[in-house]
Image: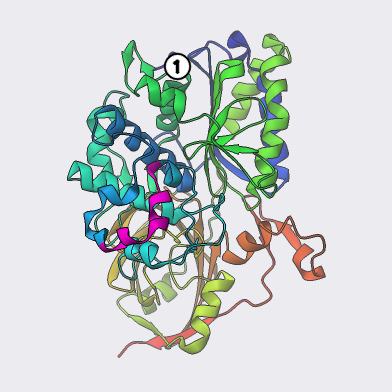
């Protein structure tokens, strides 16, 4: 484990500038979950915003791609893949019939690593519907081959890793990467083919990602041992292909790594998951966030990096501010209210059934009011998505908590929510995937119960507002971030937007567009 510096300034990290950077990105609509900076092999800066903490892993989204790249590097080092110039079909014999098409000769391991398959693939295809590799094989070829961001390309490499190793990607990486770095076995979402999604779905603790980045920075060496093959540690982050101008934060791309303006490279995931390797300053920057404009966010961060590492900081003045900021970030005020004992007695033991959602159901999903405890845009795992339709709610009240039980697709879950101003910890399962949860609840009035449930290892959360009126029942569900706000946040290349798009309010945790509609699902006591 890396030693902690006495102060950030001891290793040349200006903590005041780091705090200024975090304040700037938050004002831009970003809620930072964690920030870690390593410099000269020491932990210089480490901060978590409650309820996130070092104990929780975090969904890394497309940071996951870099670990498929790593697995390929190990396979080459062990001679199981001869070269990045090898053809993809040489390792997938089940697709022998496609070898007659000469265009497949151009799909090499390196073409997949640099997203140059030339295939017309979907960024958001549902991996759970059929065999995902067959979708890839049947997809049409583009007329011209150039860089196109493609989860499909990554998944084909994940399939090759599983094929060549006879197990999962995590199985393969455990003795080679995770165990040598002291990383507990991570969870990685798998498709219905029992192969890691590849492009997304890996859950790591922030410090775990920092260790991997530092290992890359050190040429693949950790505690005196060569953990990542030296050849691959040097090769993966090099720039191999130019990027379209649309990707303003980077001009070049490596083996699932984005190049930066300072000669470094980064792991990059949706909503702002970053592992930035900075050879120029012998430093690593890791951040986990939730925000809707990743391009603007990373531009701001890169604007601050020279100041963080090159602008001298006053240790005596800065360190107390840093300590105070770390302590304040641990605070999270949870509302409380008087208990409504009579209402609790009336509803306990009953099951509340919502009406059928009908044709509007999917529209609510897309708009961001998920019929799920998992917000729509963060549960787009591309591997196994529960097509939700939550229903059959019941409640059990304790001295300082309420247990909320509901059915969602094939899963029935009970999650505890604290009613004493504290989070209650619990677990749930959706589409076979396990999630840790934090929850709290309180009475808005004698008939209205508010509950917030956070699948704490993901980037979002859901607010449920229940209204009880005799045998009738209403539920308003709002997922944050909403799919709507995520989509609008990626429209920064559009010159003009309608007035309603600019109607933004800051919730303290994420920028969300004010809903045009707040759907309320109605129901009654189930007979």
Work out whether residue 400 can be spotted. Answer: no
Give the residues drawn in magenta, as a range.
Answer: 97-109
Rendered location of residue 380, percent (x, y): 45, 61
Picture quadrant of residue 57? top left
Colour mode? Answer: rainbow
Q: Is residue 423 left or right of residue 337?
A: left
- Please identify the residue farthest to the left as the structure is shown: 166
Quadrant of the rendering where the N terminus is positioned: top left
Residues 234 and 380: in front is 234
Residues 405 and 208: in front is 208
Q: Where is 27 relative to 439, above or below?
A: above
Identify the residue position indicated by label 1 in the image.
Answer: 218
Rendered location of residue 95, percent (x, y): 26, 60
Q: Main secondary structure of the magenta part?
A: helix
Task: Tell me what residue is drawn at x 17 percent, y 45 percent.
Answer: 166
Residues 59 and 63: in front is 63
Picture quadrant of residue 110? top left
Task: Tell me what residue is drawn at x 69 percent, y 67 percent.
Answer: 514
Q: Is residue 132 left or right of residue 330?
A: left
Task: Tell me what residue is drawn at x 46 percent, y 48 percent.
Answer: 61
Give the secondary structure at mark 1: loop
Query: Does residue 415 belong to the magenta stretch?
Result: no
Quadrant of the rendering where the C terminus is positioned: bottom left
Rendered location of residue 329, percent (x, y): 58, 35
Rendered location of residue 372, percent (x, y): 43, 69
Residues 137 and 278: in front is 137
Work out whether residue 18 can be spotted. Answer: yes
Q: Is residue 365 left or right of residue 167?
A: right
Please tell me how crowded label 1 is: few (under 14), some (14-19), or many (20+) other residues with Cα within 10 Å. some
Q: Where is 124 relative to 213, above or below?
A: below
């Amino acid at each position: 484990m890396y030693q902690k510096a006495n102060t950030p300034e001891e290793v040349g990290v200006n903590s005041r500038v780091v705090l200024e950077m975090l304040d700037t990105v938050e004002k831009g609509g970003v809620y930072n979950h964690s920030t870690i900076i390593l410099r000269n092999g020491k932990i210089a800066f480490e901060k978590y915003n409650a309820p996130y903490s070092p104990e929780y892993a975090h969904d890394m989204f497309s940071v996951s791609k870099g670990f498929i790249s790593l697995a390929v590097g190990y396979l080459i080092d062990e001679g199981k893949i001869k070269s990045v110039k090898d053809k993809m079909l040489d390792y997938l014999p089940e697709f022998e019939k496609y070898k007659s098409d000469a265009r497949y000769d151009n799909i090499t391991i390196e073409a997949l690593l640099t997203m140059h398959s030339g295939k017309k693939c979907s960024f958001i295809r549902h991996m759970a519907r059929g065999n995902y590799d067959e979708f890839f094989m049947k997809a049409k070829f583009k007329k011209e081959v150039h860089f196109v961001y493609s989860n499909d390309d990554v998944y084909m490499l994940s399939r090759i890793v599983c094929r060549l190793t006879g197990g999962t990607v995590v199985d393969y990486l455990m003795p080679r990467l995770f165990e040598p770095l002291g990383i507990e076995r991570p969870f990685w979402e798998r498709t219905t083919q029992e192969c890691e999604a590849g492009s997304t779905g890996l859950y790591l603790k922030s410090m775990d990602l920092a260790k991997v980045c530092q290992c890359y920075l050190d040429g693949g060496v950790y505690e005196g041992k060569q953990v990542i093959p030296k050849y691959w540690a040097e090769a993966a982050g090099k720039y191999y292909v130019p990027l379209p101008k649309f990707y303003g934060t980077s001009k070049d791309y490596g083996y699932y790594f984005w190049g930066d303006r300072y000669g470094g490279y980064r792991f990059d995931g949706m909503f702002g998951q970053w592992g930035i390797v900075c050879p120029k300053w012998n430093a690593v920057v890791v951040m986990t966030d939730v925000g809707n404009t990743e391009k603007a966010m990373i531009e701001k961060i890169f604007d601050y990096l020279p100041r963080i590492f090159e602008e001298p900081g006053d240790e005596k003045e800065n360190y107390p501010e840093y300590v105070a900021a770390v302590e304040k970030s641990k605070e999270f005020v949870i509302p409380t209210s008087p208990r409504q004992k009579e209402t609790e007695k009336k509803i306990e033991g009953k099951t509340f059934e919502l009406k059928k959602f009908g044709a509007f159901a999917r529209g609510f999903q897309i708009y961001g009011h998920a019929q799920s405890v998992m917000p729509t845009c963060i549960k787009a795992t591309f591997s196994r998505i529960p097509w939700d339709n939550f229903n059959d709610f019941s409640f059990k009240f304790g001295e300082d908590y309420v247990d909320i039980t509901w059915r969602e697709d094939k899963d029935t879950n009970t999650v505890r929510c604290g009613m004493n101003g504290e989070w209650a910890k619990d677990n749930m399962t959706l589409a076979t995937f396990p999630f840790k949860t934090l929850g709290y609840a309180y009475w808005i009035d004698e008939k209205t119960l508010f509950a917030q449930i956070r699948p704490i290892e993901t980037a979002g959360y859901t607010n449920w507002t229940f209204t009880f009126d005799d045998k009738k029942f209403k539920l308003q569900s709002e997922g944050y971030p909403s799919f709507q706000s995520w989509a609008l946040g990626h429209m920064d290349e559009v010159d003009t937007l309608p007035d309603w798009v600019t109607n933004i309010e800051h919730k303290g945790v994420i920028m969300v567009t004010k809903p045009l509609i707040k759907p309320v699902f109605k129901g009654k006591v189930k007979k």
